[in-house]
Image (spheres, rainbow, N blue to C red):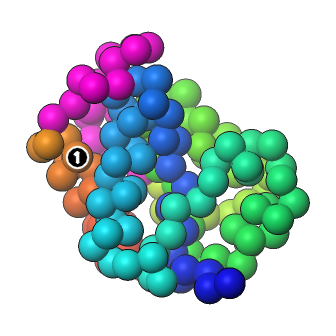
Amino acid sequence: MNVPKIGLVACNSGASNTGYLTGLAALEVVKKFGSEKVGICSLPALANNIPRQTALIKKIEHLIVIDGCRNECARKILNTLGIKYEKYLNLEYDLQITKLGPFTTLDYSGEDVEKVSSAIIKRIQEM
């Protein structure tokens, strides 16, 4: 199994606009760089401390955590597991994208996706 050089740990919650944006933008970044270089890690598997996924993420050279809101779910899961990450992006704090609440999955624009994917790419370029 090939392990990408950079792992994206995105909130990827489909429950709100910002959570959904984290996953969409992460997917755009993988399309741009290719899955050999950048891969999306399974946050649900990490939250459940699935041994294979937990061991796998520890083999990835660089990790970027992407949260959609002030709840910081992805960051908290990695911190609980003691998994270190290099970069962090929070859509509310860093990009001033407002979380609109539950059931707002489709309340985002193409410009929002571009803004988030550009911010992820910037963090990749800083490594």
Residue 50, position as x, y percentages in the image = 83, 53
Q: Which residue is mark 1?
A: 113
Q: Secondary structure at mark 1?
A: helix
**88 and 46: which is toward the camera:** 46
On-image quarter of the C terminus: bottom left
**34 and 127: which is toward the camera:** 34
Q: What amino acid is found at the position of numbered circle 1 in the picture?
A: Val
Residue 71, position as x, y percentages in the image = 55, 28
Q: Main secondary structure of the magenta part?
A: loop
Which residue is outermost to the right?
Answer: 51
Left of 73 or right of it: where is 101?
left
Residue 16, position as x, y percentages in the image = 40, 24
**Looking at the image, which residue is at 81% across and 43% down?**
48
- Residue 126 makes an appearance in the image: no
| Range shown magenta | 89-109
* 96 up-or-down from 84: above or below: above
**Looking at the image, which residue is at 52% across and 42% down?**
11
Magenta-drawn stretch contains 104:
yes
Magenta-drawn stretch contains 65:
no
